Amino acid sequence: MFYFDSESRRRRNIEPTFLTLEIRDEPRRVSTGSDGVRGEVLINTASQIINSFQSGELTVVWKEANLTNGSIPTSLTVQEPFNHTNASLSIINRTELRTAPAQCREQSPCVIQPVLFAYDADGNIIRKLGSNDQPWQVKATVVGQPNMTIVGDTADYVDGQTRFTLFSLPNLGSYQVQFSFMQPNGVKRYK
């Protein structure tokens, strides 16, 4: 279940507009899990909607369509398939490398793993990026050395930060490492 709160571009005291979109099957007599094709379709659809909103792509498409007289979605609360809790989502504005990898030895995980945070436009840490089943992921690469392999180069963004556990560099030396979000499910690049 998705709740959109939209706000008019005009700066007047206007009540927010709410749109409720519910995607579900009819209730069943016996509860079933998220297994099977139908469950996978619901999970993927939810992931695409969440990712579209959090990447800012939904806002761009909404503005281009101009079907709501300038109103655009400003917040999204979601209850994902097969989950009974609601989560408020934010649009990603910037990222910060809070903890740089340190105490790294050749071909061993760094003692201090990298930690990245994502922030919304108000400067708040975003607790959740992506769906429960398909969280956004961050990938580390060595700048200027595309053939260099970083072990443990990918981490999920969960509970307000990345979760690197095995990040390590293959050789001794000095490196410039870039951390980038991988393109989420269903999102095209908007600039």
Image: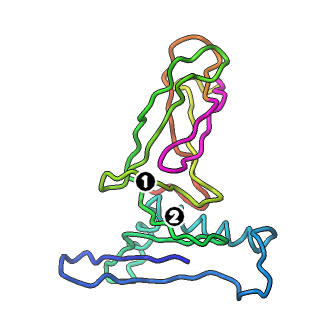
Q: Going by the picture, which residue comes out furthest to the top? A: 172
Colour scheme of the rendered structure: rainbow
Give the label on residue 188, or none: none
Amino acid residing under circle 1: Ile
At 67% from the left and 18% from the top, the residue drawn is 107
Question: Quadrant location of the N terminus?
Answer: bottom right
Disc 1 secondary structure class: loop
Q: In the structure shown, which secondary structural element does the residue marked by tag 2 occupy?
A: helix
**Residue 155: image x %, image y %?**
60, 41
Q: CA distance from mark 2 to mark 1?
A: 15 Å
Q: Which mark is residue 52?
A: 2
Q: Which residues are magenta?
A: 148-166
| Camera-nearest residue between 90 and 59 | 90
Marker count (numbered): 2
Which residue is the extreme one toward the left? 12
How many C-alpha atoms fall within 10 Å of the one at disc 1: few (<14), some, or many (≥20)? many
Q: In the rendered image, which residue does mark 1 sit on?
A: 126
User: Does 156 lie within the magenta span?
Assistant: yes
- Vertical arrangement, residue 138 with respect to residue 108, above or below: below
For image coordinates 47% across by 60% down, the residue present is: 54
The numbered mark, 2 or 1, whose residue comes first in the sequence reads 2
User: Which amino acid does the dot numbered 2 rest on?
Assistant: Ser
